[in-house]
């Protein structure tokens, strides 16, 4: 009996409306619908980067439990409204946004003064309501990250007096669901069709969220193909030479870099530490997703293998 391997189809768009999309993948081998669906769902929720407010400084406000004269909301309510603003951060470096409002005014996200690297996707988001001679001066720090990070983790060092640290929900995903149904492939009726529903906060398209999650899964699986070769040191061999040879053979995926940096390097065809060491910092900065912060991370990882970036 001849055996034929059936491969699944590429994702098909069922519907796309605003921040919500439904996609299907057909011809999955029996059981693979739940295997792939659950894996993609977990990756979408945990491994897509986004931007969020991590610190806020309000003029005349020492902590989040204070109040501001003439403002209807408490400072705590203002911070909760601020966390509902959806940001897009272009680049890796943290950015500072500011807001100054005085007198009777309904303050929204559109009132923020933004640097060129920051966009707000829901400028209509309500912040607070001022009346009379009320005054509000606020600065907020926007950072990029993954998933949910508690403020204790974000503020490893002590923050300055008057700076309020916030928990940050970086994920741009609001909801992900999937379902699996049987379908016919040839004479068999037990193949799987996977349907995935993705809803984002508007900072990323649902289709892009699915594409990035698939790419992340592929990069992770590629890293575990094969087995590690045991290193046998010869009695008269040089340990430094063996260590150097091992370092040059190290894969980018094994260097402890963040998933985003690893994906950017592998996407550019840079697979090994040796190949990375042949690049200059300026050449790496031309890659999508590689900025100053990423260069520092790469330099530290190379140093751990006894390597450095090529000099300019």
Image (spheres, rainbow, N blue to C red):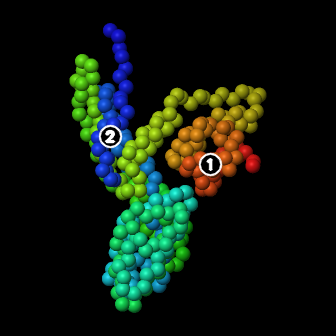
Along the horizontal axis of the image, is 94 left or right of 151?
right
In the rendered image, the quadrant that contains the N terminus is: top left
When the figure is inspected, residue 63 is found, relative to residue 276, above or below; the finding is below
**Label 1: few (<14), some or many (≥20) within 10 Å?**
few
Q: Find residue 31 and report its image quarter.
A: top left
Q: Is residue 33 left or right of residue 137?
A: left
Which is nearer the N-term, disc 2 or disc 1? 2
Element class at badge 2? strand
Residue name at image x 27 percent, y 30 percent: 192
- Number of labels in the image equals 2
Residue 13 horizontal/vertical position (percent): 32, 40
Q: Nearer the viewer, residue 1 or 14?
A: 14
111 vs 45, nearest the viewer: 111
Q: Is residue 85 above or below residue 244?
A: below
Query: Residue placed at 45% from the left, 66% from the top?
Result: 53
Residue 299, percent from left and from top: 66, 50
Residue in the picture at 40% in, 71% down: 109
Residue occupying the point 43% across, 50% down: 48
What is the number of the mark on residue 231? none
Residue 161 visible (yes or no): yes
**Residue at disc 1, secondary structure:** loop
Question: How far apart, in angstroms, are the residues tagged by discs 2 and 1?
Answer: 32 Å
Q: Is residue 213 visible?
A: no
**Mark 2 crowd level (few <14, some 14–19, many ≥20, 10 Å Cα):** some
Location of mark 2 (residue): 13
* Residue 250 point in image, percent of width and height: 62, 36
Tag 1 residue? 286
- Which x, y percent locates residue 4? 36, 16
Outermost bottom residue? 133
């Amino acid at each position: 009996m001849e055996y034929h391997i059936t491969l699944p189809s590429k994702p098909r768009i069922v519907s796309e409306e605003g921040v919500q999309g439904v996609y299907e993948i057909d011809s999955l081998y029996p059981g693979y619908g739940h295997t792939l669906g659950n894996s993609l769902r977990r990756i979408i929720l945990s491994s897509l980067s986004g931007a969020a407010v991590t610190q806020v400084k309000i003029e005349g406000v020492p902590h989040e439990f204070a109040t501001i004269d003439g403002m209807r909301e408490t400072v705590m309510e203002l911070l909760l409204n601020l966390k509902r603003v959806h940001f897009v951060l272009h680049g890796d470096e943290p950015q500072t946004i500011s807001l100054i409002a005085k007198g009777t005014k309904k303050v929204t996200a559109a009132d923020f003064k933004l640097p060129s690297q920051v966009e707000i996707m829901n400028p209509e988001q309500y912040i607070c309501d001022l009346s009379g001679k009320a005054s509000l001066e606020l600065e907020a720090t926007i950072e990029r990250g993954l998933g949910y990070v508690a403020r204790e983790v974000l503020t490893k060092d002590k923050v300055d007096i008057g700076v309020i640290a916030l928990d940050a929900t970086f994920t741009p995903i609001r909801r992900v669901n999937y379902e699996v149904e049987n379908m016919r492939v040839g004479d068999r009726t037990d193949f799987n069709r996977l349907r995935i529903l993705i809803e984002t906060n508007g900072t990323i398209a649902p289709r892009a969220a699915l594409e990035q999650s698939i790419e992340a899964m592929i990069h992770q699986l590629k890293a575990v193909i094969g087995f590690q070769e045991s290193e046998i040191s010869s009695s008269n061999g040089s340990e430094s030479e063996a260590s150097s040879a091992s370092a040059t053979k190290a894969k980018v995926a094994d260097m402890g870099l963040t998933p985003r940096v690893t994906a950017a390097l592998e996407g550019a065809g840079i697979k090994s530490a040796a190949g990375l060491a042949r690049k200059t910092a300026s050449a790496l900065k031309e890659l999508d997703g590689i900025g100053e912060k990423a260069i520092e991370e790469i330099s530290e990882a190379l140093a751990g293998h006894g390597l450095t970036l090529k000099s300019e």
